[in-house]
Amino acid sequence: MAEIEATTGGTLALALPFIAAALAPLLKRIFGSAAAWILALAPAAAFVILAGFLPTVAHGGVVSFGYDWIPAFDVRFSFRIDGLASTFALLITGIGTLIVLYSGGYLKGHRDQGRFFSFILMFMGSMLGLVLADDLMTLFVYWELTSITSFLLIGFDHERERARRGAIQALAITGGGGLALLAGFIVIRELAGLNSMSDILAAGDALRASPAYVTILILVLCGAFTKSAQMPFHVWLPNAMEAPTPVSAYLHSATMVKAGVYLLLRMQPALGGTELWTTVLPLFGAVTLVMGALLAVRATDIKITLAYTTVSSLGLLVMLIGVGTEGALIGAVLYLIAHSLFKGGLFMVAGSVDHGAHTREIERLGGLARPMPITFAAALLCALSMGGISPFVGFLAKEEIYHALEQGDAWHVFLIGAAILGNALMFAAAFIVALKPFLGRLPETIHHPHEGGVTIWFGPLILGVLSLLGALFFETYHALLSGPMASAAIGAPVRIDISWVPHLNLAFALSLATIALGICIYLASSRLRTATAATLERIGWGPDVGFDQAMRGLLHVSVFVTRRLQSGRLDYYMTVTVMAITAALFVPMILTGTLPAEPQMPDLRFYEWIVILLILVGIVAVVIAKNRLTAIVSLGIQGFGTALIFMLLGAPDLSFTQFMVETLSVVILALVMTRLKLSPADHRPWREKLPDALLAAGGGAGFGVFLLAIAQRPFDPVLSDFFERYSYAIAHGHNIVNVIIVDFRGVDTMGEIAVVMTTGLAILALIRIRVGRKGTAEPDPTETTP
Amino acid sequence: MRTVIFRFTAPYLTALMVLFSIFVLLRGHNDPGGGFIGGLIAASALAIYGIACGVGPVRRALYFHPMAISAAGLVAAVVAGIFSVFAGTGFMTGLWVFPTLFGTEVALSTPMLFDIGVYLVVVGGISSIALALEERESD
């Protein structure tokens, strides 16, 4: 393969899925579900481009490229392809290609297939960006994009309530973790001064030695554990099964849930190896591993079974990364690749079974081997890999894992026990999914089971065959995929030489024990299922219920706060606002002792006195007016008086505007007054009016004192000199006020006119609500008082 | 409010005020005036017309929904800013041309387009509120 220029090639690979996503609905409209063949070209092309970097990457090289994004904050839009990123990217684009084809067949004839293609390709692009990102902020952006796009995918059947709940749950949990991760990244940037993964990896012990290490670790783990579904954050994963099967096959094999594992592997050389790391990770991992596998055997829906085995596998990976020895990390890497292949395949098999037999309930499936032979073959291949049978890639992984954990101390015995139990349970789960639906008698409830089209069986079969080929040609496999990946995760070059030929050693013995235990569990699976189901029912509470309780609690709190703040009574709002403004004006002046000195009596001309008298008359008229309308008009007198003063002091622009604003506000206030069902006059006794009067006087006095204080400060002429000098010279305008508005401070003005328009829209909507109430008896939110 | 004299004079008054508002808008760069004040004048002109002759005729005379006018203004203002980006200078840097039309040198500029945008936003925003409020008088 010709050498591809890194920047062009990398950027193209990153952009391709998004371009395809934009075109997807159009292509779907033109070609129907056959559009899948065209759309699959995008990830396939990205795969080829990324594979072109393999020769560099396999020899420990790093391909990096990027653009400046926010130079002022040292934020770049930059990417880095090393062994870890490369293998991940190949899995994402490779399996992604198969998934796009598979969804072409699986969702054939679905009304929103175009939208589905769009979503899944967007997700693919986000995931690809996530694993290739170098700059921390770039990584975070892609991280959040995967959360958002997976929300769209899980909630694809948005008309079903369970799908919506699953989507919201996934978004809340992974999005929440994402925020923790952002905080972690900010701490890394600000306290350690490291902006990108390259920096972090180059800095060696810098993060471990940093006083903020514990904070950083906890925040990063929050992000990784939520995304990679560690107990107790795992609940979103089984609930995400509400999504169409291609989504599960993609998100829960090679992508979404692996993002957390990716992050841990990526940061392992910089964060790992401490006592905290080697305790917390294996503990969470082991619990997740065993609990996930138990729940997997309990489930009756084969898709849910697979979902829980995914939780379990993620637990195993986190546990191994936590152990952090060279062997454990190699095991983790081998298992990660193997899992992406066989789990993607098995999920697609589950979809094919659903597609062919119209049910996924294990008790109602059987005898599908004859009508669906290719699917059965694919299922067997994947399950053999998942069960860790030689010669499949799953076998390589399991050997390496046992080999890494076989040390005598109690901690490792505990971990190896968890690994054996978990693996045995997963072994059983694998064959529950791959054998039970296909063997035995065909139940009468299944009518005309059939094999799907080529796109349906193609994906799982390819993944199953790859699981076999990877182990058979283990040298190439280690050289191109697992070796570079493990080296990047360890932080030093390593050689992997595990082969599919079993050697008689302790690891192999443990492997045999696992298989034996797995067969026992498989045979007893029905009894185990009832037992675990009964136990869980007795407990009656789980993180899933807890999630609902937390959400309900959140709603209660916000309802409480809203009720308190939004009483819906205008007079209450006005009182609070004016009180707050008065306090904001007076309190700082009193605290800092900057109350203005008593002003001197200014020397005024007689016509200036007349204007002031006019203003006073206006104010008195407002106060004593019997009729509200009179009061409003009198308010106008005061405003016009002020405008006259502006005019006399030589500010024609200001005066002009003041005149217009005053006119319009009187007109609009009068219009509003006539619309409100108020009595024309205020009939409250003076006792009730007094607090309002005091408040008004307080507010007025506050502004008065504040303006006096400002006027008494020495005048700083920097700005006015600047504007005077440059207004005509560079902005071609003699009217400085206007030049400031439209030129020097144009961006401010743009914001202001946007506000004017938005306010107009909001007021229009408010008026409409009240009109609507007359006609259709809609509830009026402004009148609901607690 | 609807006296014969008022109803008779309102259209003329409105026409004069709108004309004046455009005058104020255009002279704004060198003399007191500008888009904001111009917009307020035009808005009050329309308010007068509405009070005198009812909302229907105003809406017909405006042809576009006031909110659409407002939105068009915002777009014009943003476009005025973006022009400069394409010219290679920073966002919202003023650009000027002085073509000669009919023997007179005319100053055209992005700040002027921006000011027209401000004018339209203010006219549209305020009169949509005023018209909506007046409308309820008639139902």
Image (cartoon, helix red, strand yellow):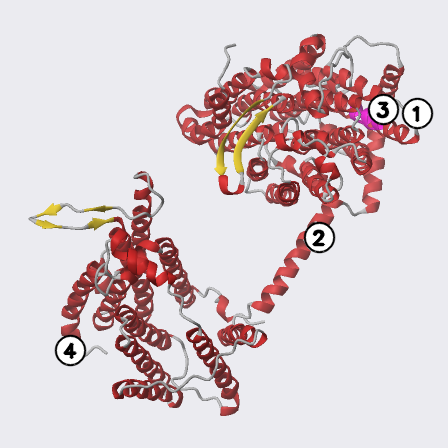
Same subunit, labels 2 and 4: the answer reads no
Task: Tell me if residue A366 can be seen.
Answer: no
Query: Which label's residue is closer to the chain start, 2 or 1?
Result: 1
Q: Which residue is mark 4?
A: B4
**Relative to residue B16, is residue A694 depicted above or below?**
below
**Magenta segment includes A421:** yes
Which kind of residue does numbered mark 4 sit on?
Answer: Val
Task: Tell me if residue A546 can be seen.
Answer: yes
The chain containing the residue under callout 1 comes to A
Same subunit, labels 2 and 1: the answer reads yes
Q: Main SS of the magenta segment? A: helix
Q: Which mark is residue A549?
A: 2
Q: Quadrant of residue A451?
A: top right
Q: Are marks 2 and 3 in contact (CB under 8 Å)?
A: no
Same subunit, labels 1 and 4: the answer reads no
Dot 1 falls on a residue whose secondary structure is loop
**Magenta segment includes A688:** no
Which residue is depicted at the point 59% across and 75% down?
A: A591
Q: Quadrant of residue A521?
A: top right
